[in-house]
Image (tube, rainbow, N blue to C red):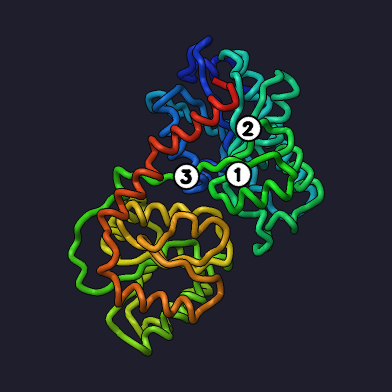
Amino acid sequence: MPEHFNESSFNQLPIIKGKSYWIWLASWYPSKSSPTNGDFIQRQAISVSAHHPLIVIHCIHDANALKPLYYDFTENESLIEIIIYFSHQGNVKGLKNKLVYNYLFYKTIITFINKLFSKIAIPRFIHVHVPIKMGVVARWIEAKWKIPYLVSEHSSEIIPIKPDSFKNRSIFYKYQVKKTFQNAIAVTNVSKAIGAILQKTFKLKEVLVIHNQADTSIFKYKEVEKPVFRFIHISTMRYEKNFTGIISVFIKLSKIRKDFELIIVGEVPDGIKQLIEYASKLFTIKAIGLLKNIEVANQLQQAHCMVLFSRSENFPCVIVESLCCGIPVITSDVGGAAEAINDSNGIVVQSEDELTLLSALQNIMTNYNRYNQEQIAFEAAKLYSGSNIANKFIDIYHRLKLI
């Protein structure tokens, strides 16, 4: 059973009793167990906290923990991040293991919330990011303290393309997600397309849209000499990203012309390495692995065009980051991937349509001078900067009369 947080532990938290805080419960958030998980939520939290004090709470297992329970907290101006760790190997296969994992998770977070609410003023509302698992916690808070909650869904699991999509989940999982959405005072999504699916699936009155944001302090236009036409692809290269389709099309392109190169950013799965090695014999392709955000921005600034050919997406951060660097984007029309793209900043193709993608690659190389990179970056920064996205959250809070 998890240890209880004692009074001395809570006295370490930089929280002043009676001070007004907004509270976000994040099912995804960066931690030492998963450093990049939900980093887009963290960016939003940083932006929103510039307007009002914000506490973000995330609970996750630590497979290497030396004690049953511990937590880390950071304070950055008006943002307090509390990461609670409990000892467990993770929510791996096996009913018994999953039951133990869920027991530890909910016991840990509920114990923490009870103690936290005794230390600070009870918040006027809770904002959940990703309905499972923190949506269950928000419903418990609502029942106990009559505190309303809203939900932001960031995943695209409602699209039935992935093995772990919503339609393939357990009856219990589906029930919990449905209850979380239907009991919320509002639901938001990062794209109109996925929002519409959520609205229809769960019979919601409406789903509001708050797009992903880019860190415009690093993702920005920079004039760089580019001697060779450089395409760039940034992803996990899992099935839904259809990286094999991209390589197939670039091999076709290499038979037509040789004046280009392809840069791959991201951790390359074992099954993909041989494919890249084969392609490297036909054209210039470089896999440079996982990079920090500042390094990703640098790679984008040196590129001519971002290429995505996904089978499933919501509203990819990498698209708005590319646009903020002034880089036009070729993307497949899945989920909300095409919502940021128009004739002035890219080309939209159909998923799996390799001939159309091949045509788009040739089109953008031949007619690249029609794209004004500075203007692309300027327009994207207006839409996807942290200050603009923060205002979207605050407008919704005002609309719901929460502030």
Tag 2 secondary structure: strand
Could you tell me if residue 27 is visible in this image?
Answer: no
Q: Is residue 81 above or below residue 162?
A: above
Tag 3 secondary structure: helix
Tag 1 secondary structure: strand
Q: Which residue is mark 1?
A: 153
Name the outermost residue toward the top.
18
Neighbour tally class for label 3: few under 14, some 14-19, many 20 plus, Cα within 10 Å: some
Q: Nearer the viewer, mark 3 or mark 2?
A: 2
* Lower position in the chain sequence, tag 1 or tag 3: 3
The C terminus: image quadrant:
top right
Q: Which mark is residue 73?
A: none
* Lower position in the chain sequence, tag 3 or tag 2: 3
Q: Residue at x 30, y 52 (%)?
A: 377
* Spot occupied by residue 11 in the image (x, y as percentages of width and height): 51, 15
Q: Hey, what amino acid is under mark 3?
A: Phe
Q: Residue at x 28, y 56 (%)?
A: 298
Q: Are marks 3 and 2 in contact (CB under 8 Å)?
A: no
Q: Which mark is residue 150?
A: 2
Q: Hey, what amino acid is under mark 1?
A: Glu
Front-most of residues 403 and 70: 403
* Spot occupied by residue 206 in the image (x, y as percentages of width and height): 65, 40
Q: Residue at x 34, y 83 (%)?
A: 283
Q: Is residue 173 above or below residue 246?
A: above
Neighbour tally class for label 2: few under 14, some 14-19, many 20 plus, Cα within 10 Å: many
75 left or right of 177? left
- The alpha-carbon separation of the residues under discs 1 and 3 comes to 12 Å
- The alpha-carbon separation of the residues under discs 3 and 2 comes to 18 Å
Q: Which residue is mark 3?
A: 40
Name the outermost residue toward the right.
171
173 left or right of 193? right
The N terminus: image quadrant:
top right
